[in-house]
Amino acid sequence: GSLVGLPPLVGMLFAGVILRNLPSDPVRGLHESWSEAIRVAGLSLIFVRSGLELDYRAFKKVGVIALRLTCCPGISEAVVVGLAAWGIFNMPIFLSLTLGFILGAVSPAVV
């Protein structure tokens, strides 16, 4: 159980925000490869924990609807941005679609 009624992942994310905004970076004095490994491990742990909190029985119950709601918004945004970049900036189609998928990956509308 949780003391404040929130999932543990929220606490992990909050702790990461606090640690990132400290006046002194906790991993600044470390060798660059160690610093990078610690950051990657922390991010991986957050992703694994968020994946473990999913209810797979509920996903299996709704089936294809969950898949469509997961994939369609991101893919449609990426394709629209890619086609707009292709038409407006005359970019090669593969490069413009790459731009669309990169923007789709960081877009607050999809996230």
Image (cartoon, grey):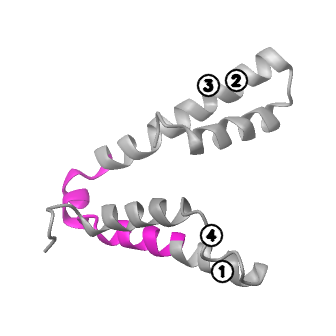
Task: Give the residue type at disc 3.
Answer: Val
* Image-based side of 35 in relation to 74, left or right: right
The residue labelled by disc 1 is: 37
Q: Residue at x 19, y 59 (%)?
A: 58
Q: Position of residue 51 (x, y in %)?
A: 37, 67
Position of residue 27 relative to residue 47, above or below, is: below
Q: Residue at x 75, y 23 (%)?
A: 85
Front of the two marks 3 and 1: 1
Name the one closer to the observer, 52 or 14: 14
- Crowdedness of circle 1 by 10 Å Cα count: few (<14), some, many (20+)? few
Dot 2 and dot 3 residues touching (CB under 8 Å): yes
Q: What kind of element bears circle 2?
A: helix
Mark 4 / mark 2, whichever is N-terminal: 4
Q: On the image, numbered disc 4 is attached to which residue?
A: 25
Q: Secondary structure under badge 1?
A: helix
Q: Quadrant of the N terminus?
A: bottom left
Residue 67 screen position, x and y as percent:
37, 49
Q: Quadrant of residue 104?
A: top right
Above/below status of 48 relative to 65: below
- Give the mark nearest the N terminus, 4 or 3: 4
- Observer-side mark, 4 or 3, equals 4
